[in-house]
Image: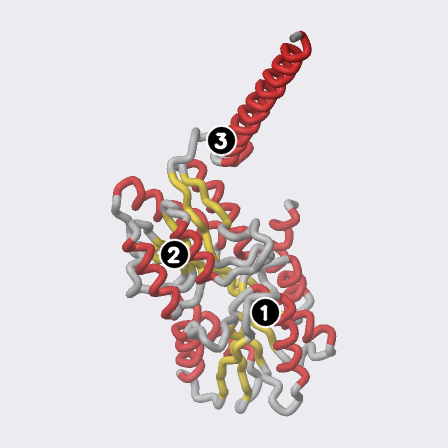
Amino acid sequence: MKRIMDDNRLMYIVMAATVLLVLSIMIGFSVSLDQDKSGSDEAGGGEGSYSYHVAMVGGDPSDVFWESLYEEARTAGAKVGIYAEDFGAALNEDYSTSELVRMAIDSRVDGIVIETDATEDIESLISQAEQAGIPVVTLMEDVPDSGRISYVGANDYTLGEMYGQEVLKAVEKDGASVDVLVPVNEEESSPSFIYTGISETVAQTSRDISVSTVRTGEDREFVSEERVRGILLDEENRPDVLVCLNVVDTISAYQCVRDYNLVGKVKIIGYYSSPEILEGIQKGVIQSTIMVNAQEAGRLCMEAMEEYLSQRYTSEYFPVSVELINEKNVDAYIQEESGE
């Protein structure tokens, strides 16, 4: 009889321990979620719990432009109750922008910010998000007929005009050739307004300058470097000027021109700012770079989302400022980045 009582007591102890274990796991999970989505000072906001979850899709986490933009968006979002997630960054596998947008829609997030090229697939997905009641903000590349609520970015044609003016400064002879490196795949559309701005600005002069586009593929360092190397080592078709429209291509062009002793033979006009790009300008390898204000873009994305989510109204276009960095002001930017 005593043995039966002991067995029962042991069973009750095991059951109680199991219940306590389950409860502790549930409490721990709840606390973890609360910490992850709280507006604590460590999260950069200090403004209380988040009211909205916004997925930010499309940027390469290793790209300094996207990194700066996302960090500012995360901080700005926390201040107004928006949890901005670098959607897909924590996944072990690489997913396309379209796949990530589809996942975000299925996850029923409160909003989506997309940095991508305008394709039929993306346009369709934005329409699906709209039908599901999820507002979409397009970033840097607009998809105006898709149902997106706002576009945050620089005016592409104005950017093209700036690049065109830099091309005219770089070209030293008539009959020169210019390659515009376009970071898209064959099935994606090119940034036509930027290219139009470049070609029309160059065409306004009487000089004989050939401008063409070269697709560099996915926004990945290895792919970009291989493509740029192939362009520069082709002596018969090597361009006099390389115009780069993203950070990865700019750094690849700088490294290849330097490594293959092409300094002075090929001029580089770059995009955005990084330690390598600023170094390239300082050394005279890169003529100039056009810097879209990434932090401003990140703040404006959250401003557009907060306005719409709280008021169901927002501006259709949020312009982002653009600056030119060249040999005249590069030292000031280097000192600013070094904190001196």
**What is the quadrant of residue 143 in the picture?**
bottom left
Classify the position of the C terminus by image quarter. Answer: top right
Rendered view: 174 above or below 1: below
**Is there a contact, CB below 8 Å, between mark 2 and mark 3?**
no
Rendered view: 201 above or below 82: below
**How much space separates mark 2 and mark 3, taking CA atoms?**
30 Å
> Which amino acid type is marked by label 3?
Asp
Give the total number of marks visible in the rendering.
3
Q: Which marked residue is nearer to the observer: mark 2 or mark 3?
A: 3
Q: Within 10 angstroms of label 3, few (less than 14), some, or many (20 or more) residues?
A: some
**What is the quadrant of residue 101 in the picture?**
bottom left
Disc 3: which residue: 34
Disc number placed over residue 152 in the picture, else none: 2
Residue placed at 67% from the left, 7% from the top?
A: 2
**How much space separates mark 1 and mark 2, taking CA atoms?**
22 Å
The numbered mark, 1 or 3, whose residue comes first in the sequence reads 3
The numbered mark, 1 or 2, whose residue comes first in the sequence reads 2
> Which amino acid type is marked by label 2?
Val
> Which amino acid type is marked by label 1?
Asp
Disc number placed over residue 249 in the picture, else none: 1
